[in-house]
Image: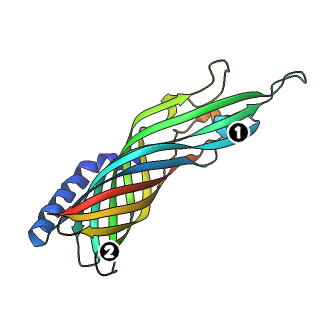
């Protein structure tokens, strides 16, 4: 699903550049930066990660940084493409019991750490508040490339966990969120924001071997980003 959309990316970028040029001639656009913490986990069936036992998922704490332009469509709506680096993933604590009654449970910890370069294409909705305060809602699709996929496991335990080679190279997702801003004179606007990014395609590629064992792994990334930022008009 992600590959055809990736092939359309050059066309999408060309359309965005045309839109930016047209908007810049009509009215000022905003340019902004935002950065902060990311709290991520897996959503869906993670059965292929383990082969039974007690599971306890743990969120991954990472960071993100993003640059964007906000192209006004009217007084309320704006088109907002971004370029974003974000860390995602999760950890799984898996207690496994092997074979005989004398074998005690074996604690297995598997940490999945991913880094993505994402291109969200968001619709920005301005909520009138008056004065120096600003409030925006944002929502829209995103597409990203997996820059790094690292899976760390216990060195002394042989597992059936997913190898790095099975992690998807791309991710298609949907982002929604809100931002509060305070205008600092004529210099620009300081912002606080919270966005939630949910992957649409699976984290791993179709795993036929896992499916034959009844261990389908239909799980996706889910990431909450909390950020501070700054935006100004050109």
Q: Secondary structure at mark 2?
A: strand
Q: How many marks?
A: 2
Q: Classify 10 Å Cα crowding around label 1: few (below 14), some (14-19), many (20 and above).
A: few
Could one spot residue 199 in this view of the protein? Answer: no
Q: Horizontally, is 48 left or right of 170 in the view?
A: right
State the image coordinates of residue 159 (x, y, percent, origin top left): 66, 25
Q: Horizontally, is 28 left or right of 41 in the view?
A: left
Name the outermost residue toward the top: 156
Q: Nearer the viewer, residue 225 or 215?
A: 225
Q: Are marks 1 and 2 in contact (CB under 8 Å)?
A: no
**Figure quadrant of residue 152:** top right
State the image coordinates of residue 217 (x, y, percent, origin top left): 61, 42
Question: At x 89% / y 21%, what residue is drawn?
Answer: 102
In this picture, is 186 found above or below 226?
below
Residue, disc 2: 133
Q: Nearer the viewer, residue 173 or 76?
A: 76
Could one spot residue 120 in this view of the protein? Answer: yes
Measure the C-alpha gap from mark 1 to mark 2.
53 Å
Residue, disc 1: 214
Q: Classify 10 Å Cα crowding around label 2: few (below 14), some (14-19), many (20 and above).
A: some
Q: Nearer the viewer, residue 219 or 195?
A: 195
Q: Horizontally, is 150 left or right of 183 in the view?
A: right
Question: At x 39% / y 42%, what residue is drawn?
Answer: 116
Question: At x 51% / y 32%, what residue is drawn?
Answer: 166
Q: Earlier in the sequence, mark 1 or mark 2?
A: 2
């Amino acid at each position: 699903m992600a590959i055809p959309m990736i092939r359309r990316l050059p066309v999408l970028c060309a359309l965005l550049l045309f839109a930016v040029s047209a908007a810049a001639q009509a009215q000022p656009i905003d340019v902004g930066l935002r950065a902060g913490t990311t709290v991520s986990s897996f959503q869906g069936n993670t059965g292929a990660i383990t082969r039974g036992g007690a599971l306890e998922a743990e969120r991954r704490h990472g960071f993100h940084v993003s640059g964007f332009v906000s192209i006004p469509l009217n007084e309320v709506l704006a088109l907002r493409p971004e370029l974003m680096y974000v860390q995602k993933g999760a950890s799984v604590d898996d207690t496994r019991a092997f074979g005989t009654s004398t074998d005690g449970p074996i604690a297995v910890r598997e940490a999945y750490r991913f880094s993505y370069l994402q291109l969200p294409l968001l619709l920005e909705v301005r909520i009138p508040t008056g004065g120096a305060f600003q409030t925006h809602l944002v929502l829209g699709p995103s597409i990203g490339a997996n820059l790094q996929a690292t899976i760390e496991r216990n060195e002394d335990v042989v597992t059936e966990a997913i190898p790095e080679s099975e992690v998807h190279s791309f991710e298609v997702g949907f982002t929604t969120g809100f931002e509060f801003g305070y205008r600092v004179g004529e210099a620009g606007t300081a912002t606080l924001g919270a966005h939630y990014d949910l992957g649409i395609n699976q984290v791993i590629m179709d795993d036929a071997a896992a499916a034959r064992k009844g261990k389908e792994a239909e799980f996706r990334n889910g990431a909450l980003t909390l950020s501070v930022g700054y935006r100004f008009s050109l």
